[in-house]
Image (cartoon, rainbow, N blue to C red):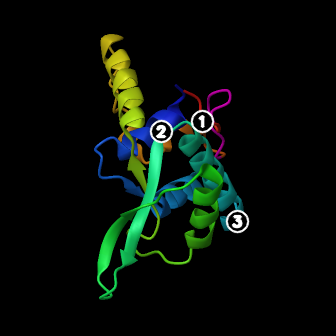
Amino acid sequence: MNELTYQLLADVSDETGVDIYGWHIGIADRTREPEAVVEVRILGYLRELLTADLIGLGSIEADEAGRGVWTNWHGDVDELIQRAAVRYGTSDTVWNLFATATPRGVQVFEAEEAGREAAGQDPWAHVDDRFGGIWDEDGNVIEPHGDEIVV
C-alpha cells in the first residue's frame, strides 16, 4: 500500500469518517494546484477507493421535518461519483460530503498498520501531518505512483 492510500484510509479508520473538504484543503495546500484540478484529483481518488470498496460516502440530509440526519449513500460507483461531484465544493459545511469506513477498508488498513508495526515502523508517523509526509517541497508525491490509489 502506498502512503497516499494509507493516509486516506487512516482518516476513516476510526469509523467516524472524514469531511472531503479536509482532504481538499490538505492536498491543495501541498500541490498548489488550481481548485478545479484538486477537485478532479480527489474525485479520482474517491472513484478508486469506492471501486475497491475501501470507503463509502455519506452526508447530512434534511428529513421530512427539515432536521439534518445522517445518510449513507448507496448506488454504483458512477452514481456515487456523479452525486459527489454535484455536492463537491458547494458548501464548506461539515458533513456536506463525507468519506466513511467500510468493513473491507478497515480490514485492509488494520492489516497494513499491523505490518508496519511488526516491521518496527511508527504506523502513524506521517498521518497526523495532514498529508505532509508524502509530498515534496514542490507539491509532488514523493514515491513512484504515489499520486494513485495503490493497495
Looking at the image, residue 150 sits to the left or right of residue 7; the answer is: right
Measuring from the top left, give residue 74's x and y in whole percent.
48, 56
Residue visible at 61% across and 71% down? 86
Q: What residue type is labelled 2?
A: Leu
Q: Does the magenta stretch include residue 141?
A: yes
The amino acid beneath tag 3 is Ala
Is 16 in front, or is 81?
81
> Given contact means CB atoms under 8 Å apart, are the residues at marks 1 and 2 in contact?
yes
Q: Residue drawn 44% across and 71% down?
A: 96
Disc number for residue 36: 3
Q: Is residue 126 visible?
A: no
* In the image, farthest residue toward the top: 119
Q: Is mark 3 on a helix, strand or loop?
A: helix
Residues drawn in magenta: 139-146
State how far apart marks 3 and 2 are (Cα): 24 Å
In primary-sequence order, the first of circles 3 and 2 is 3
Earlier residue among tags 1 and 3: 3
Give the residue at x 64% y 39%. 147
- Left or right: 27, with 72 as reference point: right
Instruction: Write down the residue under mark 1.
Output: 149
The residue nearer to you, when weighing 111 against 26, is: 111
